[in-house]
Image (cartoon, coloured by chain):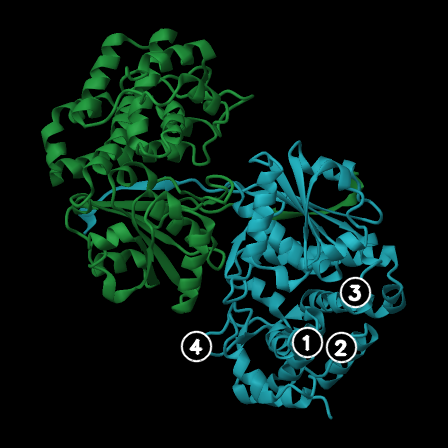
Chain colours: A green, B cyan
């Protein structure tokens, strides 16, 4: 066999890089965008919600535009990405263009993936306009869109050239969506930073009022935590799994609610589920779960599983979790607020089905 | 502005790597493929020509399959890639799969691009089955498919995990397609290796007979030349442009023939056009053009532009060449057989329109 190998082709490593995260209030302008576009022609991808809220008005005159309709998960598929690419071609964009994703997580996913595959790749700028996207999805380089069969069947890792966060974009966000995204902030605090947890507890009224200064601090803390984790583990081989805290049960509840519950709302429920599992495993405490519940409730987030979802449905669904090993998921857990649980270098852990079942049962909303 | 940049996110460099090129005759087997699949489940992408020729029979039993129909450029689009990905999902393939592209350049393009974007990327193995794919397209990591508007609107750089060349796959190739691909071998010799040019001149009858030993040597020489160039310049910033030798005029003739002429046939014509341009610029000679023409003719390749294509049409089209700068292409040229022309570190050169026009006029077939 070895004598059949006639040569080896060497592939060069990519260079190490970095991208800036800009945070401010009322900062969006053509001038700011031009700076990060670095001479490239800009093509802005946004959605009808952002467009209705007028958040794209600062950019209208100097760029190509694509407004995704309807906004949200329903459009997050390969068909929309094809429409984006063909709209770019129709408006004469080439390899010298840059795509700017202006919107929530689904806009970022579509803009990022379009940038990854347009003419073998152009840069992408992210301007996240939701609490969840500002906290979480704009950093890390993961992009993905759905096929007609499954979620994120298509995707690529494609780091942005810059992330621009303007807290003013949160002002027009519907109440439920605004609070939903704050669940990711609570998650970040719990896995990495107990001072941040205290900051959240102390800032409830400012958060409810959407005060710029607190929102800027929030964005900065979230981005630093997310950045630290993805820098260590860009391709989700290990440490990055801790970002899945609260998501295993959360994803199942989200699916079983028929997406009537928002992602962050389900993460909130999942965080409490993780807390109950931690109690069973000895790394948690009733007091910690209560403390967490209080914070989540103050942020208008649900902490119980709706009665119309059964324990059996949840257990059945998490067997198909995409991160499952041998038909059962690994759980991201914490040792204490601000400190992830690691064992033997692992950041996600096997948990007996009985323990999961018991935690889910306790979380079932009483009818 | 600087004070708005609150943090920078670091991105890790990818690691340097290498992939093997396996060359032999009658070597295709499940066992060979399994070795390079490295435990991953294999999904084979091929086309109806390859399937009709029975070249996939060695693999039928142990893998998922997708047969592209019709074969060729018509199917090289994003719609086919979606069909491939959804077929993979339907047959239960996940992140632990590998795609094998078994076929010519268009199969490799589609298999490679599908692998680049399926679940954020899985490995790809290339088994090129045409002279052009064995010489050229299976090495280098470029993938791309067409939108409804333009060629290669979608694409990615995605290096294969291995390239497996079996000269037996060339036995069933239609005559014109077989010889057409040899134009890329002549191109490689001209830009990089005068001994190889001599080898081609001395092997005409073996090449016409498709003798395994000569075809294996050909594959090895081609891959070594292509590898050396793409190793230096993976993203086509400079040196890789020399691979465009004969392609600027060639592409225009290919388009204007309505794709009645095959790619390699047009490259053959383009190589002679480059030779005539070189004479005008002082780096060529009539004798060299004659020598080149003789070799191409012995390989059943055309060396004149068909009469139904006008000089004006060609000049107009090359202004839109994708590598054009300010509306006029740069030309890859040689100093002598085996030696590319470089000036001031550049591998592609501006040439006056009059010189190009004169070369094209000389190449017009007399009615």
State the separation of the CA atoms marked 2 and 1. 8 Å
User: Would residue A110 be found to the left or right of residue A50 on screen?
Assistant: right
**Displayed quadrant of residue A273:** top left
State the separation of the CA atoms marked 3 and 2. 19 Å
Residue B271: numbered disc: 1
Residue B297: image location, x then y, percent: 80, 77
Q: Secondary structure at mark 3?
A: helix
Residue B326: numbered disc: 4
Q: Secondary structure at mark 1?
A: helix
Near mark 2 (Cα within 10 A), the count class, few <14, some 14-19 or many ≥20, is: many
In this view, the residue in front, A302 or A271, is: A302
- Give the label, 2 or 1, closer to the camera: 1
State the separation of the CA atoms marked 4 and 3. 37 Å
State the separation of the CA atoms marked 4 and 1. 24 Å
Q: Residue at x 75, y 61 (%)?
A: B131
* Residue A348 visible to an observer of this rendering: no
């Amino acid at each position: 066999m070895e004598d059949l190998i006639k040569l080896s082709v060497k592939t060069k490593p990519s260079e190490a890089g970095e991208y800036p995260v800009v945070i401010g209030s009322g900062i969006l302008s053509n001038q700011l965008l031009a700076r990060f576009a670095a001479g490239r022609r800009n093509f802005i991808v946004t959605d009808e919600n952002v467009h209705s809220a007028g958040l794209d008005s600062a950019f209208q005159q100097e760029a190509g535009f694509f407004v995704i309709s309807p906004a949200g998960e329903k459009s997050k598929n390969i068909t929309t990405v094809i429409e984006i690419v063909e709209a770019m071609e129709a408006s004469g964009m080439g390899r010298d263009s840059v795509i700017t994703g202006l919107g929530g997580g689904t806009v970022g996913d579509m803009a990022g993936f379009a940038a990854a595959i347009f003419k073998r790749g152009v840069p992408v700028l992210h301007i996240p306009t939701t609490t969840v996207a500002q906290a979480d999805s704009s950093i890390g380089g993961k992009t993905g869109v759905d096929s007609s069969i499954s979620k994120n069947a298509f995707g690529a890792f494609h780091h942005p050239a810059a992330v621009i966060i303007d807290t003013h974009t949160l002002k027009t966000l519907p109440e439920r969506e605004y609070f939903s995204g704050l669940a990711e902030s609570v998650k970040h605090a719990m896995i990495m930073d107990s001072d941040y947890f205290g900051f959240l507890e102390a800032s409830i009224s400012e958060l409810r009022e959407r005060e710029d200064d607190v929102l800027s601090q929030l964005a900065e803390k979230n981005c630093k935590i997310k950045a630290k984790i993805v820098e260590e583990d860009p391709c989700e081989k290990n440490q990055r799994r801790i970002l899945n805290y609260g998501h295993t049960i959360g994803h199942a509840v989200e699916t079983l609610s028929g997406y009537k519950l928002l992602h962050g709302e389900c993460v909130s429920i999942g965080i409490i589920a993780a807390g109950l599992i931690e109690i069973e495993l000895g790394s948690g405490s009733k007091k910690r779960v209560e403390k967490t519940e209080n914070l989540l409730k103050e942020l208008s987030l649900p902490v119980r599983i709706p009665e119309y979802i059964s324990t059996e449905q949840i257990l059945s669904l998490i067997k198909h979790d995409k991160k499952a090993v041998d038909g059962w998921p690994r759980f991201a857990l914490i040792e204490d607020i601000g400190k992830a649980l690691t064992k033997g270098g692992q950041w996600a852990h096997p948990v007996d089905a009985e323990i999961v079942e018991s935690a889910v049962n306790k979380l079932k909303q009483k009818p």
